[in-house]
Image (spheres, grey):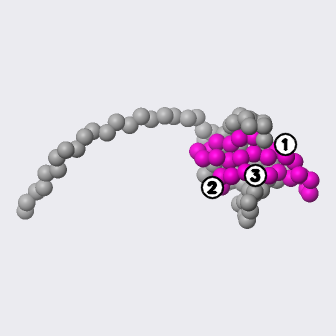
Amino acid sequence: MKQRVITGLRPISFALVFVPIPTGFVLAQGVPPGSYECWYFTRAQPGLNFTVGGGGAYTDADGKKGSIAVGSDGKIVFSGGAHDGSNAVYKGGNPPTISFVSARGAEAAFCQLAR
């Protein structure tokens, strides 16, 4: 049996960057990117609006940047920007919906992907 020799290969260097993420969370996995418009019952809440970008980034209504981490159970934790420390739940749907929740777990406002 004849062996083939591959020549011309070059070593590849990799740089690893570690970003701390709460255990059990991934950055914005499953949350569609785009602008989310927020509501409290039937009343628009433009101050809560935000935009989800790639890689877990988000921008609040005032243009301040932050990040979101999504747990496998759909729970979202916001870091930075106007929603820093806020808890929410990704509910999916059509249009996709994210609900801000109180400390007791009650829905305080909901935000839907604007189309």
Give the labeled residue for mark 3: 36
Q: Position of residue 1 (x, y in %)?
A: 7, 62
Q: Residue at x 84, y 42 (%)?
A: 47
Q: CA distance from mark 2 to mark 1?
A: 24 Å
Mark 2 / mark 1, whichever is N-terminal: 2
Q: Position of residue 22 (x, y in %)?
A: 63, 39
Relative to 3, is 85 above or below? Answer: above
Examine the structure image and report whether residue 44 is included in the region drawn in magenta: yes
Amino acid type at circle 1 is: Gly
Closer to the observer: label 2 or label 3? 3
**Residue 95 in sight:** yes
Secondary structure under badge 2? loop
Give the labeled residue for mark 2: 30
Give the labeled residue for mark 1: 47
Q: Residue at x 68, y 47 (%)?
A: 52
Secondary structure under badge 1? helix
